[in-house]
Image (cartoon, rainbow, N blue to C red):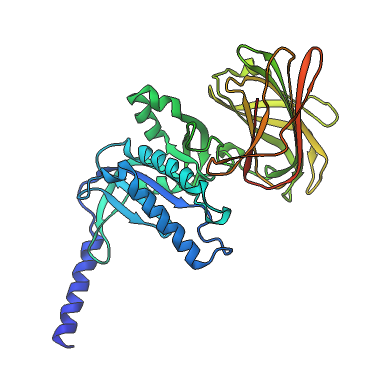
Amino acid sequence: MSGRALLSQRMSSNRIRKVSNPSLFTRTYHWIFVDIVDSSDPKLSAKEQAEKIINLTRLLSKTTTFMQRDPQFDFILPTGDGYAIGFSDSPEKPTKLAIELQKLLILYNHSKKKGNKIFVRTGIDSGPVYLLHDLTGKPNVWGPSLNTARRLMDLCEPMNILISDRVAKDLRKLSHDYRNIIHTFGMYELKHNERLHVYGVYGRDYGNKQPPSIPLFNMQGPGIKFYLTSIDVKLRILDQETMLTRHNVSWEIMNSTNEPIREILVPLVGDVPKKIPQLHFSASDEKSQKLDVEKILDKPFNKNFFVKLKNPIKRYQKKKMLNLQYDWEEPNRFFAHTVRSNLRRFKFSLFVPSAMKIKPKLLQVDASGFKTKIYPPPKVIRHREKTEAFWSGSDLPADHSYRFEW
């Protein structure tokens, strides 16, 4: 063996020993794991996919939080279609960075065509990591907090900011501002049967308040997956001052599994803290039979129910209706419903006292939060004791929200 080859072998051997020995003590890092939704969409060329990653990098670098990082101790780990960034000092930085990035993305997406828009998923956790070195000798890390941030990101709907229980508790103790933007989404089961209490971060112009669609841990099992093929929403204002509203929502359900569906998960989200008895929640089927309801999540702004069906829905069986009724305030005078599958029909009706002035409009909201006004607007019919506004649409695409304002 030549001297040069021997030297190279020794260097490789030393490097491997360096990689295989973690530091004696761990250090606490605060992680944000962010990647682009559908970055490898086969409909996009390789150049278009690369341009999305380049633009995400540029937007990240423009955030104040990123510019104030500690270059000596913070980690920036490219992940192919995103980044894992570890901050060594403040547990607030990942959440602040996520909010700043989403605000920049909304502005960026405003002028872009549908295929060129960038939507991201974001997971955040804090905890100890081991300091390692990679094959090139550069500093690297490994630890459960980095893995948890990645798994939270995997749970995300587009533009979700999901944080762990550890981060949520720490931030909520710091200020009321964090308490107002951190909302519980419930307990979820991640990989390797790990159960984690998941929180969502969202506000007026960032985040996504739709909880992850992956089932909660105690909803695992056959017969829980379904599509909505038709939605009918009727809102009736019961109190003008508080905007207490009676919600009547009807879902037409199609079973997409090989097993019969015997129970349906119903998640509810509100803008005013409520207790379950105050909702007067009830459910019935297409025969107006009252259905048994089991509560599984009771948080001030989030409720989850299991509705048990009297007659199971068979595979690909249609025309099975689930009718829901509940009372919840709508102080901001709007109601939004997210469409998770291609929808055959969507109908909306609003009933208000005749003395109440309304200017109803309908907005389609994409995954980034960008709103597009839909024409024609809801029709308005004025009666002696009430005013009715209504709208209906057909063949609506999945992964949009429809926001009705009045």
Left of 232 or right of it: where is 42?
left
Q: Residue at x 59, y 63 (%)?
A: 43
Residue nearer the viewer, 379 or 212: 379
Image quadrant holding the N terminus, namely bottom left
Q: In this picture, is 283 found above or below 192?
A: above
Rendered image quadrant of residue 263: top right
Residue at 46% from the left image edge and 38% from the top image edge: 196
> To which quarter of the image does residue 68 belong?
top left
| Percent coordinates x, y for residue 98 in the rendering | 40, 41
Q: How many marks?
A: 0
Q: Position of residue 272 (x, y in %)?
A: 55, 20
- 210 vs 391, left or right, is left
Q: Nearer the viewer, residue 378 or 14?
A: 378
Rendered residue at 21%/67% (across/down): 15
Q: Is residue 151 visible?
A: yes
Location of the C terminus by quadrant is top right
What residue lies at 68% left-to-right and 17% top-to-bottom? Answer: 357
Answer left or right for 145 relative to 181.
Answer: left
**Is residue 251 at least partly visible in the picture?**
no
Q: In the picture provided, is 273 more to the left or to the right than 340?
A: left
Q: Quadrant of residue 54?
A: bottom left
The answer to which of 11 and 178 lies nearer the viewer is 178
**Of all residues shown, which one is farthest toward the bottom?**
1
Q: Position of residue 97 (x, y in %)?
A: 36, 41
Q: Residue furthest left?
A: 3
